Image (cartoon, helix red, strand yellow):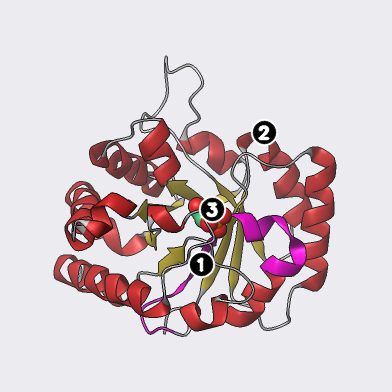
Amino acid sequence: MRRKLIAGNWKMNGSLVANQDLIGAVGAGLPVAHCAVALCVPSPYLAQAQALLAGSGIDVGAQDLSCHESGAFTGEISAAMLREFGVRYAIVGHSERRQFHRESDAEVAQKAQRALAAGITPIVCIGETLAEREAGQTEAVVKRQLAAVIHTNGHCISEIVLAYEPVWAIGTGKTASPQQAQQVHAVLRSQLAAASEHADRIGILYGGSMNAVNAANLLGQPDIDGGLIGGASLKAADFLAIISAAA
Ligand code: 13P
């Protein structure tokens, strides 16, 4: 049985003061029997998050990492550096990075490899744009994105977390219906099963306008193992409601 994971992606939001309030409120309201919970914070706040989350049962996550190990890569942050701040998860291949930073499938796959080598679980994001969905290309797109990660990571694929995030649902308030999401998750599950005998243990999260109201229905689907939460992770009450729906 896969344990559900609810991961907040704060994106480029927060401040020292606001983070302290938010982490305090989430920690204080955490249900007793909860699922796995993580907060993926902007890099400058990793030390703060590590200190505030110590002993809380909530893991620290990063939002990206370098595909290089070390060296002359100005502005980049390595997996080993993240590890020093107790980072357990790192998002890789978020659509905002694929779109605005031109990250390729191959680069995302390398980032996943760097994370795994450092003992960090990559949360590998894949998903189609609205144009691709309307052109009937959803399956082909997500399978291509996942195939690159499988190709580079081989049997280690069983150690990743996958996140299906339809680009048209991110920050738009338009959520994939539970059936739409489940359909894609089932496709991804069978692709993983063909690549690894341990595919059963790979968590596949849904992300894209998941909120306190729609979480329970999405999380009730057989192949939806949690959520990657953007906007709703910035409000303690909403994020806690999603955790309760998963617990
Ligand atoms: P929203 O929950 O704000 O739609 O963002 C989803 C997301 O991109 C999480 O990585």
Q: Which range of residues does the magenta coloring cover?
A: 221-239
What residue is shown at x 28% (from left), y 76% (from top)? 183
Where residue 96 sits in the image (x, y, percent)?
A: 44, 41
- The kind of residue on which mark 1 rests is Gly
Q: Quadrant of residue 180?
A: bottom left
| Discs 1, 2 touching: Cβ within 8 Å | no
Say whether residue 243 is visible.
yes
**Residue behind label 3 places its C-beta within 8 angstroms of ligand 1:** yes
**Mark nearer the N terminus (3 vs 1):** 3
Mark 2 crowdedness (10 Å alpha carbons): few <14, some 14-19, many ≥20: few
Q: Is residue 171 left or right of residue 122?
A: right
* Residue beneath the point at 73% across and 56% down: 53
In front of the other: 130 or 230: 130
* Residue linked to disc 3: 171
Numbered disc 2: secondary structure: helix
The quadrant holding residue 118 is top left
Residue at numbered disc 2: 44
Report the mark closest to the observer, 2 or 3.
3
- Which residue corresponds to the image point at 54% horizontal and 61% vertical from the top-left? 173
Reply yes or no: does residue 207 show up in magenta: no
**Rendered location of residue 45, percent (x, y):** 70, 39
Q: Bin the neighbour count of mark 1 within 10 Å (Cα to Cα): few under 14, some 14-19, many 20 and up.
A: many
Task: State which quarter of the image contains the C terminus.
Answer: bottom right
The residue under the point 73% across, 79% down is 31
Mark 3, secondary structure of its residue: loop
Q: Quadrant of the N terminus?
A: bottom left
Q: Quick one: 27 or 213, which is closer to the camera?
A: 213
Mark positioned earlier in the residue sequence (2 or 3): 2
Residue beneath disc 1 = 227
Who comes first in sequence, dot 1 or dot 2? 2
